[in-house]
Every structure is written in C-alpha cells, then in structure tokens.
Amino acid sequence: IAVINADFSGENLFSVMSDDYAGALQAAEFLFSMGHRRIAYCVSELRFLSHQMRMKAYRQTLEKHGVPFDERLVYSCLISEKDFCTTFENWERQGITPTAIMAVDDMEALKMMSYLKSMGKKIPQDVSIIGYENSTFAQYAIPSLTTMAINEGALGKDACDILFHRLENPGSRHIAVLHHATLLEQDSVCRREGA
C-alpha cells in the first residue's frame, strides 16, 4: 500500500508526502516579510498529520519573530459564517483584529474570503489571506488566492513508482518520499505597513 500525505510505517506500507511543515513555514514567513504581525490561523482537524505540521510551523514562526502566540487568533474552520462573523467582531472589540489569515487549506481560505466579503471587508486591503495546496477550484477566487502549491501529480506518480518497484523487489524496505510545496504569490496578500 502506498499512502499519500500520511506517514504510516509497517510491512508493505509506503508513504509519499508533501513537506507540510516546511511549506507552512514558508507561508508564515512570507506573511511576516509582507509586514504582517497579527496573523490568525484557521485550523481544521488536528488528527491529520499534515494539519498538525502546518499548525506547528505557524506557532514556531510567531515565536521566531518574537510574537506571542495568542490562542484567540486560532479558530476552527468548522464554524459557520455567523460564528466567524461573531469571532471577527470580537477580535475588533478586543483590538486584536488580524491583518492576515493563514488557512489550513484552499477550501478554508475561500470560505474565509466569502465570509469577510459578506462583512464588507476588502481582501487584501483589510485582511490578507493565504491558502495551502493550490487546489484547482482556487483559481476562480477573486482576488486570486496566494497559496502554497503542492504538485499532486508528482505525489501520485511517486506512489505508483514505489508500488511498481516493490512488486519487482519484494524485499525492499519502507520508503518515505517528501515533496516540497512552492509559494504561489497572487493577489490575496498585500504588504502591510506598521502592522
């Protein structure tokens, strides 16, 4: 069995993964390079290794830049539009409105963009958004979505190559292949002065 984006070990199990930790580090560093310091994080289920790695990278980037981790700026992407609007209004009342949101994936980034637009917020002028995965549907976002691109075709090809290699070499050991994500800089992130 060749598994994509999950790290299992055992006999006849092989892993092909995106390096989600390094990719999320790059995404967070990009936001810092654009002047953002108050960055919210839209998290999904942490039972997924990829989501754990992205969250870890977010926290470590804050620490590296001397920005205290604020759990109020981490929220679940499983909340409704009404709940997100309430969360955002609470941020505004508390004076901790984020200048950027780092979403765990592109689907959540697009939801955040829709929610923010429903509140009359402009992207990226009011809030910048960065996604993850470069999903095919993300190309329809307005403004175009800045994201970390994963080469899904290469992941699939490597998984097939590993399986064929294993069939031809039954005694081969566990193989884990890491792929690097690439920053796709588009229009949903802007430079923030004095953030």
Image (cartoon, rainbow, N blue to C red):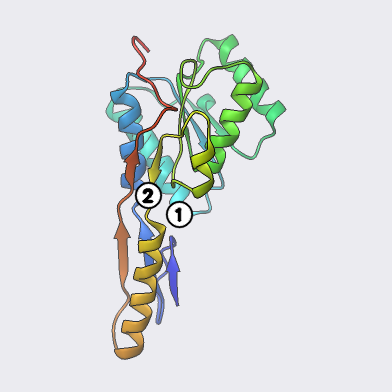
Tell me if mark 2 has few (under 14), some (14-19) or many (20+) residues whose alpha carbon lies within 10 angstroms of its own.
many
- Which disc, if any, is residue 131? none
Residue at x-position 35% and y-position 36%: 27
Judging by the rendered image, the residue that carries numbered circle 1 is 49
Q: Nearer the viewer, residue 132 or 55?
A: 132
| Spatial separation of the CA atoms under disc 1 and disc 2 | 9 Å
Residue 62, above or below 98:
below
Hey, what amino acid is under mark 1?
A: Leu
Question: Is residue 76 visible from the viewing direction of this image?
Answer: no
Q: Nearer the viewer, mark 1 or mark 2?
A: 2
- Which disc, if any, is residue 20? 2
> Does residue 20 appear left or right of residue 64 in this picture?
right
Hey, what amino acid is under mark 2?
A: Asp
Q: Nearer the viewer, residue 52 or 117?
A: 117
Residue at x-position 33% and y-position 35%: 60
Mark 2 and mark 1 in contact (Cβ < 8 Å)?
A: yes
- Looking at marks 1 and 2 on the same chain, the residue that comes earlier in the sequence is marked by 2
Tell me if mark 1 has few (under 14), some (14-19) or many (20+) residues whose alpha carbon lies within 10 angstroms of its own.
some
The picture places residue 153, in percent across and down from the top left corner, at 39, 62
Residue 182, above or below 144:
below
In the rendered picture of this protein, how many numbered marks are placed on residues? Answer: 2
Specify the quadrant that holds the C terminus.
top left
Residue 51, above or below 89:
below
Q: Please, what secondary structure does the residue beneath circle 2 have?
A: helix
The picture places residue 109, in percent across and down from the top left corner, at 53, 36
- Res 112 → quadrant: top right
Residue at x-position 50% and y-position 21%: 123
Residue at x-position 57% and y-position 17%: 121
The picture places residue 145, in percent across and down from the top left corner, at 46, 34
The picture places residue 78, in percent across and down from the top left corner, at 64, 40
> Does residue 49 appear left or right of residue 157 in this picture?
right
Q: Please, what secondary structure does the residue beneath circle 1 have?
A: helix
